[in-house]
Amino acid sequence: MKFGGTSVGSAQRIKNVASLVKSRGKNIIVLSAMSGTTNTLVEISDYLYKGNLAGAKETINALESKYKGVIDELYSTPEYKAKATEAVHEHIDFIRGYNRPVFTVFDEKEVLARGEMMSTALMYMYMREIGVNASMLPALDFMRTDKNSEPDVEYIQSHLQALLDENTEADLYITQGFICRNAYGEIDNLERGGSDYSASLIGAAVKAEEIEIWTDIDGMHNNDPRYVEGTSPVSQLHFEEAAELAYFGAKILHPTCVLPAKLNNIPVRLLNTMCPEAPGTLIFNTAATRSIKAVAAKDNITAIKIKSGRMLLAYGFLRKVFEIFETHRTPIDMVVTSEVGVSVTIDSERNLDAIVDDLKKFGTVTVDKDMVIICVVGDLEWQNRGFEAEVVNALKDIPVRMISYGGSNYNISLLVRKSDKINALNLLSRHLFNQ
Ligand code: ADP
Ligand code: ASP
Ligand code: MG
């Protein structure tokens, strides 16, 4: 059972989660940092990178007083108030200790890890105070990535199992999401939002019956509730559909989270901590067919077009183009081709100039920035008639830069301007879901 930042975002929410999990038996509880904490730790790191120690100090003090307030409200006994204060103090003091002129990415990872360490410490102690025999599984003792920064599945499995075997008496287990060690034993993390990934890796490692992602909304909605009113939860999604939605911007789920569950055939359920009785969304290898399920949008996309007059005769043209992206370690999201050229999209501008420079060897290059991929997901197997028409028709008044369909049975992607995103999402909800 994984609980996100909002779900553990205050003393009251921590109490709610404790009462929810304690009635559910011997589960592994994966926690994110309290909401806002990771952002604050990023902010502190930014000050430290810039050598602004005063800025860092002020932000650290504000973080500390926030946690003091939580402790005051959460615990009822002086014993646990003192224990929790000591634990939080230790983490805050560790961060305060960065007062040297040089601050590295390794230091930042150490700082970020403290968010999950604090939330789990608070939950663990609260459980103890209310008489639950909780056992802590330190993520840094089992969650590990290999030299390719991929999860070291065997290491995770064996080390987690060893920890569980040491504590068979426990009522339940608590661990940190997001944080891990890399292949060299240094503290690292699974990237922002990565607690979902932790939960899924843990579920896979212990061959769980189910992986539950508890958050602040009742499941995957059919459109992004931050931009569209009146969206509704989707009751079932295929693994592939959920993966497409997560990858193309549905923030509720981290994109990498689906794979471990899919490989091990473990259902993933998205549930709402604020409304535990709501059915949420079940993600598994079966789901309703012949329907469009949901829409998502991925921001910060750049489109690159390479036009080559000789493409028809030039076999190997695409390989050369793709090799350039590979050299610059930049993944491509969308691809469309014509006889004379190819358009692709990327979601990072980090190597854009170098990529464009290299592409110019093969043709005329045009770049469109500030674009958004709108992704429509469902059972879009090609023999199903009419779905593409409905999608394109819904967006008939919006300029569309690229359309991609047929790459999988589950999605149609359209590239539009960032300024048209909200309008496009709303039009799709209205046309596809009558909302
Ligand atoms: P947590 O902190 O629990 O990991 P997140 O903030 O990462 O929670 O994800 C939940 C949020 O995702 C929701 O509050 C909602 O605003 C956003 N969201 C974006 N797209 C969707 C969608 N299609 N369905 C549900 N929530 C979505
Ligand atoms: N705390 C981390 C973040 O804010 C990880 C997570 O919440 O999933 O990104
Ligand atoms: Mg999240």
Image (tube, rainbow, N blue to C red):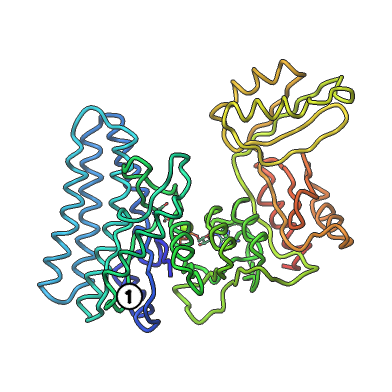
Q: Residue furthest bottom?
A: 23
What is the quadrant of residue 165 in the picture?
A: bottom left
Viewer-nearest residue: 228 or 224: 224
Which amino acid, by three-letter code, is at mark 1? Leu
The answer to whether residue 236 is above or below residue 339 is below
Seen from the viewer's position, the closer of residues 392 and 310 is 310
Q: In which quarter of the image is residue 245?
A: bottom right
Please state the total of marks drawn on the protein image.
1
Tell me the residue that label 1 is attached to. 172
Location of the C terminus by quadrant is bottom right
Identify which residue is drawn at 40% across, 67% down.
7
Q: Give the residue furthest to the top.
A: 361
Q: Percent position (x, y) of residue 151?
A: 46, 50
Q: Quadrant of residue 26?
A: bottom left
Which residue is found at the position 11% from the left and 66% from the top? Answer: 82
Instruction: Tell which of 435 and 135 is nearer to you.
Output: 135
Residue drawn at 84 percent across, 60 percent down: 387
Label 1 environment density (alpha carbons within 10 Å; few <14, some 14–19, many ≥20): many
Q: Position of residue 340 (x, y in %)?
A: 86, 26
The residue drawn where x is 85% and y is 57% is 382
* Residue 86 as seen in the image, left or right of residue 363: left
Assess mark 1: CB under 8 A from ligand 1? no
Secondary structure, mark 1, is strand
**Residue 361 percent coordinates (x, y):** 72, 15
Instruction: Establish if 149 lies above or below 13.
Output: above
Q: Say whether residue 218 is left or right of residue 366.
A: left
**Image x and y of residue 12, in percent:** 31, 73
